[in-house]
Structure formats: C-alpha cells, structure tokens
Image (tube, coloured by chain):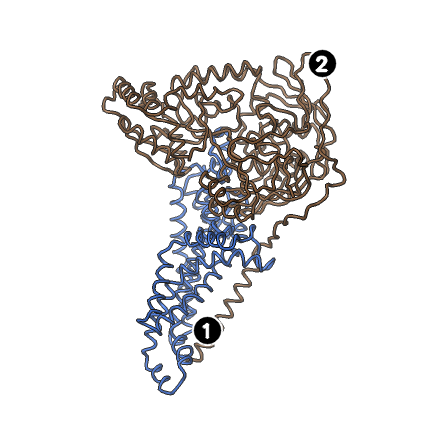
Chain colours: A brown, B blue
Amino acid sequence: MERTVIVRLKALWFTTLALGLAVSACAPATAPPASAPTPSAAPASQAAPQASPKSPPLASGTTQAPSAASTPTPRPATGTGAVPQSGSEQPRYGGIVKAISAFDIATLDVISSSSTTVQYVTRPVYSTLLRVDPAKPTEVVGDLATNWEITDGGKVYVFTLRDGVRWHDGQPFTAADVVFSIDRMRNPPKGITSVRKDLWQTISAVEAVDARNVKITLKAPNASLFSLLAAAPSQIVPKHVLEKDPKAITANMVGTGPYKFVKNEKGIVFEAKRNENYYVKGRPYLDGVQYYIIPDAATGFAALRAHRVNFGGWGGSGISVSQSQQIQREGLQINMVRYPSIGGQFIILNQRPGRPFADERVRKAFALATDVTAAIQLAQEGLGRRVGTFVNPASALPEAEVLKYPQYQPVTDKKLAEAKALLTAAGYPNGLDLDGSGYSQATYVNAMEVFAQQAKSVFRIKIKGLETAAAYDGWKAGRFDMAVAPGSPAMNDPSVRAAEFYVSGAGSNYAGINDKEVDRYYAKSLEATDPLERRKIVQEWERYMLDHYLIWYLTNNEYIMPMWKEIRDKYIPDLTSGHEWQDVWIAQ
Amino acid sequence: MRVYIARRLLLFIPTLLGVSTLIFFLIRIVPGDVAILALAGPGGDVRQIDPVSLKALREQMGVDKPLLVQYVDWLWTVVRLDMGRSFTQDQPVVSIIWQRLPITAELAILASLLTALMGIPTGVLAALYRGTWIDYTSRVVAIAGVAMPTFWIGLVIIVALLWLFKWFPPLGYVSFFHDPWVNIQQVIWPALALGYYHMAVVSRMTRGTMLEVIRQDYVRTARAKGLADFMVITRHTLRNALLPIVTIMGIQFGVMMGGAVIMESIFLLPGLGRTLFLAITMRDYPLLQGIVMFLSVSYLAINLAVDLLYAWLDPRIRYS
C-alpha cells in the first residue's frame, strides 16, 4: 500500500513537470524586441540634415504659404532640467528610444479611440496634412501639404501636396488619400466609429483637384480648421489599404511617417522602425521607437532608474515631483523636461436649473472661499499651471490678469465674510451642503479635500471619489453639486474646447452651462480667421466666463518627462501634435 | 468511481449556470456606458461623441437589446465555445484567453513549485523541532508571508533588486521556449512573491500533518526496527503527511490562476489576471464574462482533479 502511494507520488511529480513544460510551449512565440544596435553610420541614401526648399512666392489674394520643414532651430526647455543642446553637437544616426506607455494600446485606428496613448504611439508612423511648428507651437506649418490658398471669404481651401511621398508599402501618396482620410473622419463607414466626427462637420465637401491638390470647402469660415488638420488624430491613412479592408489599420499600420510599424503586442510592446524613404531628407535619426506597456507607476519608475527604458513617456507615463527629486538625490543622469498639456482639471459647478450654483452669487461665493493656487501646491506637488478657461497661449488671457480673480488668491477672513454675505443674499444664511463628486484618483480627490478645508465655514462639501465610468455617469446626469473633472479637449483650440465643454448642449458640458453670451462668443470665434482678431474675441470671452464664474481650470496639467542623458531632442514635446520623433537622436 | 466522476461533471452545469448568471447581471449593475468606454480605451478620456454614432456602436455591440435577450445570446455562444468578441480588443474572446493563459499558467505553476519548495521543508523542520527556535522562526516567516499583501512583497522585490543590484527584469515578455533565460528572469520574481504568500498555509499544514503522522504506530515501529531517522521521516512520515498537502496545493493553484492580477501588473506579465482587470475597468462584457467562465471551469476542474488524485494516491479512499 505504502509503495503504491510512493510510486503514485513520483508519477504525479513527473506529470506536473511535463504539463508545465507543455503549457509553456503553448505560450505565444514572442520574439524579444530588437535590442539597441551598435552605433551605425548614417544611411548612404540620407544626407546630413539640411533645410528644405522654401515655398515659392504666392499671388495676391492668397495667404502666406507655410514653410516646409526647414532646418529646425534648437529651443531650450523651460522648467526643471533642460535637454542638452550643445551647439557643437551634431545629430548622429542609430539607437532605439525605449519609452513607457502607462496604458495598453487597444487599437491602432486613431479615429475610433479618444485615448491620447493611441495618438502618441501612432504619430510617428502617420503624417498629417499640417503640423504644429515644433519651434513655435502657436503656429502651424505644412507636413504632407506644402502650400495652400484660401478663397471665397475663407470657405474654400486648396492644399498643394508634397511631391514624391510614398506609403510604407511603396505605393504613391496622392490627393485621393487625403480625400479618403478626411471623408473617413467625417462619415466613417459602417462598423467604424469616428470619435471626433463632430469636429469634421464644418467641412461640406472635400475633393481631389488633381493628384497633388486637394480642395476643402467649408460650410462657413472656420478659424479652427488649421488646428484640426494639424492635430495628432487627423492622420492621413492609405486609401488603397482601407478600401480592401475598412478595419485593416486597427491592428496594422501603413503610413507615410518617419517610422514604419513593426508590431503591437497587446500588453507588452509597440514597436516601429526607421522609414528609410521618409520624405524629409536626413530624418529620422533613430533606428526605431519602442513603447513598453507598464501600467504600474512604481514599476515604470524602477524600469527607468535601471535604464531598461531611456524615456519616461508622456502624460500618465511621466513622473511625479517627488520621483524627480529622488532622481536628483540619486544623481542619476536623467534629464527631466517639464511641459504643459493642452488640458487640465476643471472645477465644475453644477448650474442646472434648481441647483444652488445656478445662482451666480453662490458661484462667486465658492470662488471667494477657495484658493486654486494652494490646491495646486498641496494636491499636485505644485505641478500645474494656473489658467482661466482657455489654455492656448496664442489666445488665452495672460496669467497676471487671471490671477486677479478671487479663486486664485489666498482665502482670507475678508473673502470668507464676503462669501457668507453672498450666500445669505442667495438664501443660504447657514452655509451650504454640497455633494462633491470626483475621480477616485489622488490628484482629484486631494484637490477637493483642500477646497473642503478652505471653504468649510461656508460650504460643507461631502466628497465622493468615484471610479471612471461611475464618475462620468454621475456628471452626465448632473448628480452632483461640484466636481473636479478632466478637461482635455481634442485639440488646443479655443473653439474646439468650447464646443466640448462650454457651449449649450455640448457633449462634455457637465456644468450645465447654458449661456447665450457664451454661445455667441463661440460663433464669433469660429468666424474670426484673423489671429489677432480671434485673440481679442477669445480674451473677451474668457473674461466674461470668469467674471460670471461659469467655469475655470483648477490647473493646466503639467508633466515631467524624464529621459536619460543620451537622448537628444531639438524641441520641447508639444502635445498639440504629439512628439516630433523625427528630430530625436541618441548621443554616444 | 465512474459514477462519482459523472456526477461531479454533471454538477458543473448548475454551478456554471449560477456563475454565469451572477457575473452577467452583476457587471451590468455597475454604472458606466460601455460604448463610450470602448471608444476611450485604457486610460482614455471618456469623451462624448455624437448620439447617432453611439447608437450605431451600441447596436454593433449588442448592448441595445433587452438584458434577457443578451443573456440568452451570450449563453448560446458559451455553449458553442465561442464566447463572443471583445469590445475593446476587437478579437474573439477565446483567442485572447488562449494567448494569455500560458503566461498565467506558467506563473501559477512556478509559484506552486516555489510554494512547495519553501513551504514543505519549513513545515517539516517546524514539526521535527517543535517548540524550539526553529519552530518559532518558521512560524514567524509563515505568518509574515500571509500578513504582507502580495503587491507589497512584489514592490519590495523590485526595489530590492534595484537598490542592491541596480537591476530590473528584462522588458517585453518572452516565452520560455523562445528564450528560457530571459523568461526565467521575468517570471521568477512574481512567482517568488506569490509563492511566499501561499507557502504559509502549506508550511503550517505540513507541520500539522507531520505531527499527526509522527505519532502513528507504524512510525514507532519503523524507529523500533532501527531505521535511520532520515529514512523514517522521508519514507514513512512525510510521504503520508503529504496527501492533504497535495489537496491544498491543488486548490491554491486554482486561486493563483485567478488571483495573479497584481503580480502581473507589477511585473509586466500580460496574463489572464491583467486582462481580466482591464476588462472590468473598461466594462468589456464579453471578455470579462469569458475569462470568469473560463476560470470557473478551471477551478471546478482542478477541484475535481485534486479529489480524484487524492483517491488515486491513497487507494484506501473510495468515492461511491
């Protein structure tokens, strides 16, 4: 009997081992990503970086052509750390940037996802018609388009496309691809969802004049068109691929960008390699780009410090202030670039009829009883810029003017007394109980805790930290009084921002703002194609919204992007268009 | 025995029916618009899109139908071993499970091995040296393993590797058969963390069963015959004490398969656990339901296998 037990136990052990090996054999045959190659000489076909030819002078009645990709001018980073830009350094070819993505990449088709992660990873593979000038982020220059004319009072645009561009599969790029791509974003085929479809409805028709010219006709003049065409999600995709299979690019990518798609292993890594036939001669410098999916912040930080990755990533993949301090303490050779995003966190006061904040006096009382500056310091480790309701530096109010409003100043007894008086006049002599609803993420809830403490003598805020889906459901249904909520628009354009958050009936207008004057300013902002006039309109608009305490940002998000010292970058990453990977290189 | 097996297999059906009903309706009670979350993707902004597109998307997903209709439709896909298509990954659920399962299984197997390697010797020593510092140390080590959360153990391992060796496991999961050395570097650490957590139970149980068996007459007889201590312990005592340990470890294996979410996230293993967590946050109903059903079937199968194994190892046990 005993011997039987012994024999069977041995048999069990061997069987388990064999099963384990068999199961492991069934695991996906995942090839390890290519390791960083040894420094390579510049490819023979690529000359040293040089200026592209400027556009020819235009006839009268047309706008100034944008400059083609000229020799980039190095611009120092601002804030903590600076990307080394030694004047004597010459870019060198070779190397791979290994970056972190905090989120998995569910799809590679940017039009059917609102995730900025999808935008970032796909940006190096695709091109857009225009792009934000990396040297001057408030301006737009050509990418696939080299030139354009505007006629018919700002309703008709004709873009001239760059010659000699090829898709990564070798097929020629033509105007038909642009028409196809824009139509796809305006009116996606069945089975495809375009999350920014509304933004493209400003276009009434798009057609190919010939192989190199595209004509876009608008329903009405729209000053946001350039921002729309330059935005990272406005990628030009291959007609010849998608006509055969409308979903081809959800898992594969054929673009015209500086990098070619290699693979996207879900949950593991996204990889792209150099496009040897890129239309900007001398670019890109890198052999490739890899994004490793690292959802846990502590793990990502450890991987960065151990030099398993050499680039921290953007947004949610960046590091905190305390982590940046730790890097400095440890003396690691990591540069840290501090940069703003196009969005931030709103302070939303529910102004729907019947709610306390429908009364402007109550909103003003809240502004008097809280201090955004202190909240940023305490809840965000001081990371974040103070802005009003608009973020684009080309049009937003200067910070000095924004800071004059009471919500940006320290809470004093005088301010609290004024708040109390306003509440009494509004019918709340004993203060007000508020239902506070925010994301359960620390920065959101912490900010609400700060407000609750600051305003406790006049407002009693009951804070609820909710999971993403539940939070959005509650805001959409108006089941809250005040909230700290994300406020990142599809692009950094004031009209687009308003269309999402401020105008009556806007999809993300959780505050329930229903103000005819706001809607009027929105309409005016669309029509103002002159940048100076537009700036004036937007600043008036912002003053109006702040004067009536309709909505304001807790903070314009700032991120700290770490990169190991060997990485060189000519520009601060501009999140309106995504990082310009073609200009990144790795030093010796 | 065949009757017993048949009866146990038949009992799978009501159990799985109960699980499927529970998970199906439970996840739908949780607030959140599935269509908007699918468009947002992991970490994406939940941006409102136009109602017409949302309606079309909901129709495509099948979430516009009445709940009972959705439930019956989904049950039918389960019966056909189809399980539908993931909302967020646009792939068949079965193929996602098939891709992720080996990674989680490898982690669970390695963790089980480490549990055995750490837990059994500790328990044996604690039993043999009962009441001494060895026993007390083993108890402290075991209780510490249970008391410390696994995610904390995992993070401590990462910090320790970084601090002591300036080292981090290689990124980008690689299968054992593609590169065994890289694979071991990636999987050994989460297996250690998981194994340490589960070794406590194994250690304490080994100690208890060893103490029971040591008191048996046949062990006294073996000693009286003049057998060396080593032979008495390994051949007569331990092997009989291991029977309930095998049962426990089988159940722990099932738990590890379903509970490796944290370890997979920290150590970057794209296994079933992490996929399940993502499915919950994104309200990916087909994927969530599919994985839960799969884990339920696995757990039931493992329990049955453990019971049968127990009977096979010890012929005295017979199921009627």
Left/right placement of residue B65 relative to residue A163 reads: left
Q: Which residue is mark 1?
A: A9
Amino acid carrying mark 2 in the image:
Ala
Q: Quadrant of the N terminus of chain B?
A: bottom left
Category of crowding for the residue at label 2, using alpha-carbon neighbours closer than 10 angstroms: few (below 14), some (14–19), many (at least 20): few
Residue A554 falls in which quadrant of the image? Answer: top left
Left/right placement of residue A332 relative to residue B292 reads: right
Front residue (pair B173, A403): A403
Q: Which residue is mark 2?
A: A59
Q: Quadrant of the C terminus of chain B?
A: bottom left
Q: Are marks 1 and 2 in contact (CB under 8 Å)?
A: no
Front residue (pair B241, A330): A330
Q: Residue furthest left?
A: A430
Question: What x and y, as percent, mark residue B214?
Answer: 34, 77
Residue B178 in view here? yes
Q: Residue at x 44, y 57 (%)?
A: B193
- Give the number of marks: 2
Amino acid carrying mark 1 in the image:
Leu
Q: Chain of mark 1?
A: A
Question: What x and y, as percent, mark residue B86?
Answer: 51, 44
Q: Residue at x 73, y 19 (%)?
A: A56
